[in-house]
Amino acid sequence: MKLHNLQPAKGSVHKEKRLGRGEASGKGGTSTKGNKGQQSRTGYQRKMAHEGGQMPIQRRVPKRGFKNINRIEYKVFNLGQLQQLSEKYNLAEITLENLYINGLIAQTDRVKVLGNGELTAKLSFRVNAISEKAKSAIETAGGSVEIIK
């Protein structure tokens, strides 16, 4: 097989249909578009989600709930996870910068610490939010907490 021998498979390439080229083209006066009507006219575009008169799916399916525009999304870490991360990456301080550098959060993420798990290391935290249980566990382990906005 050489480059000059390559060709598409038999029947896979179709000839382009040339419309509106006169009576002799074999497509007749309507150029295969049927008789009159909106679809035969130039500039016709089918409406999005039109289902031929059937009730469209976005109207058949009921709406549920709402999206709260004031919701603040946090990336959540438990104390047990942070204990493992501090051992793995040799962290003495848990900050947004440290978490971002180690690929654990995106640059715009907000971080919240929850109290699930056990913390044995003395760590200082600079995060966006923290639960009361986590705060007391950090302070009993000898660490410090700073909330940043």
Image (cartoon, grey):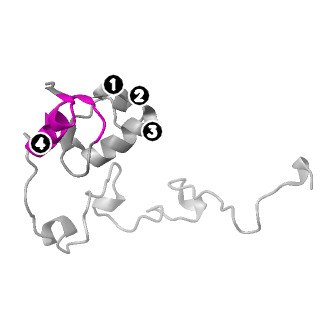
Q: Which of marks 4 and 1 is in front?
A: 4
User: Which stretch appears magenta?
Assistant: 120-144
Q: Which of marks 1 and 3 is in front?
A: 3
What residue is disc 1 on? 97
Q: Which amino acid does the dot numbered 1 rest on?
A: Glu
Q: What residue is shown at x 41% (from left), y 28% (from top)?
A: 101
Question: What distance separates the C-alpha of mark 1 from that of mark 3?
Answer: 16 Å
Q: Which amino acid does the dot numbered 3 rest on?
A: Lys
Q: State yes or no: discs 1 and 2 in contact (Cβ < 8 Å).
A: yes
Left or right: residue 51 versus residue 22 is left
What residue is disc 2 on? 101
Residue 38 image-quadrant placement: bottom left
Q: Nearer the viewer, mark 4 or mark 2?
A: 4
Q: State yes or no: discs 2 and 3 in contact (Cβ < 8 Å).
A: no
Give whichever of discs 1 and 3 has the lower sequence position: 3
Q: What residue is shown at x 72% (from left), y 69% (from top)?
A: 11
What residue is disc 3 on? 88
